[in-house]
Image (cartoon, coloured by chain):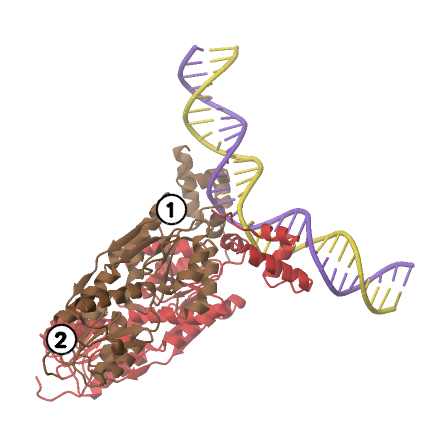
Chain colours: A red, B brown, C yellow, D purple
Amino acid sequence: MAKKVTIRDVAEAAGLSVTTVSLILNGKGARFAADTQAKVRHCAKVLDYHPDYFARGLVGQRGNSLGIVVPDILNPFFATFVQQVSEVAIPQGYFPQVFSVNGFHENVGHFIEQFAGGTQRGLILAAPGASSEIVDKLTQSDNLPLVFTDQAEVSTGGDMVLIDEAIAGQAIAEHLLKLGHRRIALVVPQTLSLNLVKRFSGFQTAFAAYGVPLPDDLIFRERFGPDGGEAAATKIVATDATAIIAINDDMAVGVYRGLMAQGKRIPADYSVVGFDDIPLASYLTPQLTTVHQPIHALAEKAVSRIIDRLAHPSLPLEVTHLATRLVVRGSTTAIIPGNR
Amino acid sequence: MAKKVTIRDVAEAAGLSVTTVSLILNGKGARFAADTQAKVRHCAKVLDYHPDYFARGLVGQRGNSLGIVVPDILNPFFATFVQQVSEVAIPQGYFPQVFSVNGFHENVGHFIEQFAGGTQRGLILAAPGASSEIVDKLTQSDNLPLVFTDQAEVSTGGDMVLIDEAIAGQAIAEHLLKLGHRRIALVVPQTLSLNLVKRFSGFQTAFAAYGVPLPDDLIFRERFGPDGGEAAATKIVATDATAIIAINDDMAVGVYRGLMAQGKRIPADYSVVGFDDIPLASYLTPQLTTVHQPIHALAEKAVSRIIDRLAHPSLPLEVTHLATRLVVRGSTTAIIPGNR
DNA sequence: AATCAAACGTAAAACGTTTTACTAAGTTAA
DNA sequence: TTAACTTAGTAAAACGTTTTACGTTTGATT
C-alpha cells in the first residue's frame, strides 16, 4: 500500500541532496553542520525511512547476514550452537541466517544459489556432510570468509574451529575401560563424517592402550538421531556387551529408550556414554556421562574469525582447537563381576 | 578474486543481448529460437553465472526468503516447527530464514531493519511476545504476507494458524480431575502471552466444571524453560498438591528434574502433564502425558497461506484452527487415597 | 506490389543506494 | 592581496538485474 519511502524522499523533505542524507545516515557525515545532521535524522525518523536492503547490497556493502549451516536443527547440540552464535554475532551487528540441511542432497542447489549469490558476509559451516561439492564452489566465491567447525581436516579455503576429537574420544573410552568394561558396544551413524572418524580413532587409541581388541562385532551402524540409537540398543541386548558408547548424545537418548523398552537398567546392566553434553543429557534418568563441548567458545571463535577476516581478508588461515571436558554422571559405573 | 560473472558476460559470450539472456534464463523465453536458448544456457553454465541476489531483488522480485521468528530455538517445539516449515517451503522454492529471539527486546531493532528492509517474501511469526511494537510496523510494510501462529487474537494484518488453546487446556485439566486430583499445581511463565492466556482459561473451565476452585496458592510463576520448571518443583514439594500442570513440555522437563532431585516419584507422588508433545516427552522416564500439537499441519498451513497470498494479495484474511490431541502416557495416574 | 502478421530479437529505463569527484564560499596564513 | 585551506554541500556514475516498449526480418495473404 504505502509507497516505499526512499532516500530521495528524505532528501527532499530535508531540502538537501541525496548524498548528504546517505552520508549522514551512515555515520560518515561528521563533516556536516550539526543542525543539518539533526534535520536529516529527524526527517528520516518522521518518514519512517529504512534503506532498501537490495539497493544497498547492490552497490557493494553486502548485507549483514552471517550464514550458519547445520546438519540438523533438531539435534540440541546444533540448536545450542546456533543460539550461541546468534548471541555473539548480533551485538556485533551481524545477523545470523540459519540453514538446516535435512535431506542434504536435495538442498544443495539452494545453498549454492543463496551463498554464491553473495547474500552473506560470512559463512559458518557446521555440516560435516558438506565437503567437496559445496565447499569448492564456496571457497572460490568472491571473498566470503568461511569457518569450518566439525569438519576436521578440510584445510583448504577457510579457518577452522575444532575440538580435539581424538583426545575426547580417547578420554571417554578410557573412562569405561578404567571402570573395568571390556566388551563395549559402539553406536555410530552409517557414514562417519571427518570429525567422527577422528573421534572414533580416539576410541581405538584407548582400546589399544588397554590391550583390548576393537570389538568389531559390537559396532552398530544405524540411522543418525535417537531412532538409530534405539535400534542399536535392541540389538545390543542380545550381545555380551556391558557398556555402550554412543557417538553423540542424540543417539544416546535413543539408546536409553531402547534399553528401557527391553527392561534393562542403566548403569546396572549397561553403562552408557554419549558426546556433546546437550542440555538434555543432565535431564535423563540417570544423567548421562558425556563429553562437554565448549559451545560458547566455539561460537565466539567462529564469529570472531569471520569478522576479523572481513576486516583483513588476507589474514593467514588459522586452525583453532578448543578443549573438551569429560563429564562423569550417573550413567556409568564400574563393571559388576558376574553380573551377567 | 575471480571477477564476478555478470549477465553481460553471458550475453557477450553468446553474442546476444542482455535482455535475451535474462528472458531465457528466467523461463520467459519461449519465443526465442531453440538453439538460441540452448546457447544461452550453455554459456551460463560454462561461465558459472549466478544472478546477483541484490540486483535482482532491487528490481522487484524480492528474493525467495521466508522469515520465521521463534521465541527460542532451544525449545524443541520451535526447533521442530522450524524444521517442518523448511521441509514444506523448500520444495516450493522458498528458503526459510530463521530468527530466534532470545532476549527479545534487545533484538527488536534488528528485526525491523531486516523485515522492513523487504528482504523476505513473507513472514511467519511464532513469537508470542512480538505483538504491538513489531507487528504494527510490519503490517503496514509494503505487502508482506504475515502469518501468526501462537498469537491467539491479533486479528489485524495477517492470517492466523492456531490451535484451539482453550479446548486443549481444558482437556488436560479434565484428565487430571477425572483421575481424582483436586489440588493441582500450575507452572507458568511470568508473563502469559495471548495463546497461553487462552490455554490457561481452558484450565479454569475444567476446574469450574468440576466445582473445584482455581488453586490460587498453587500457581507458580517462574522463568520460561526447564530452569523455571525446576524452581517451581522445589516449591511444590512443600505444598499438598498431588498433580502438576506445566504450561509446556519444556517447563515440564524442569519439573521432572526438580522432583527427582527431591527424591519424589512420578506419578506415585505427583502426576505431571505438559503441553506440545516435543520428541523428548516420550524419552523421559516416565513418559510425559501431554497435548500433541499438529506441528506438521501447522507448518504446512502457514507456508501455504503465505504462498497463496503472494499470488493473490487481496485474499481475505483467514483464521485456521487445527485440532490437538491429548496423549496420555505414564506420568499421570489416578490419585492414591491417603497417599499423603 | 502492398499489407499484415509472426518470429526473433534488442535498447534503454528503472530500481534505491553508495561513492567518487567535484564546487562554492568562507577563512586563514604569508 | 593572494594563495592555500577548510567547511558544507552536491551531481552524477556505478552496481547488475528485470521489464517495457520497440525494431527488424521473413513469409504469407491480399
Q: Which quadrant of the figure has residue A33?
A: bottom right
Q: Residue B40, how many percent across, how many down?
A: 43, 40
> Residue at the spot x=50%, y=53% of the render?
A54
Q: Name the amino acid type tagged 2.
A: Met
Horizontal relation, residue B90 to residue B17: left or right: left
Identify the amino acid type marked 1: Leu
Q: Secondary structure at mark 2?
A: helix
Residue indicated by mark 1: B310
Q: Residue at x 41, y 57 (%)?
A: A137
Across and down, in percent, residue B242 comes to 17, 78
Give percent across and percent down for residue B217.
26, 79
User: Which one is in front, B112 or B120?
Assistant: B112
Can residue B79 be seen here?
Answer: no
Location of residue C2 with respect to B224 vertically, above or below: above
Q: Are marks 1 and 2 in contact (CB under 8 Å)?
A: no
Q: Secondary structure at mark 1?
A: helix
Answer few, some or many: residues within 10 Å of disc 2's Cα (few below 14, many 20 plus, some between 14 and 19).
Answer: some
Left or right: B54 in relation to A333? right
Horizontal side of residue B87 vs A87, given as left or right: left
**Which residue has dot 2 on it?**
A260
Mark 1 burial class by Cα count in 10 Å: few <14, some 14-19, many 20+: some
Assign the C terminus of chain B to one quadrant of the image.
Answer: bottom left
- Disc tally is 2
Q: CA distance from mark 1 to mark 2?
A: 49 Å
Q: Quadrant of residue A96?
A: bottom left
Q: Residue B213, can we see it?
A: yes
**Is residue B133 shown above or below B60?**
below
Q: Nearer the viewer, residue A125 or B302?
A: B302
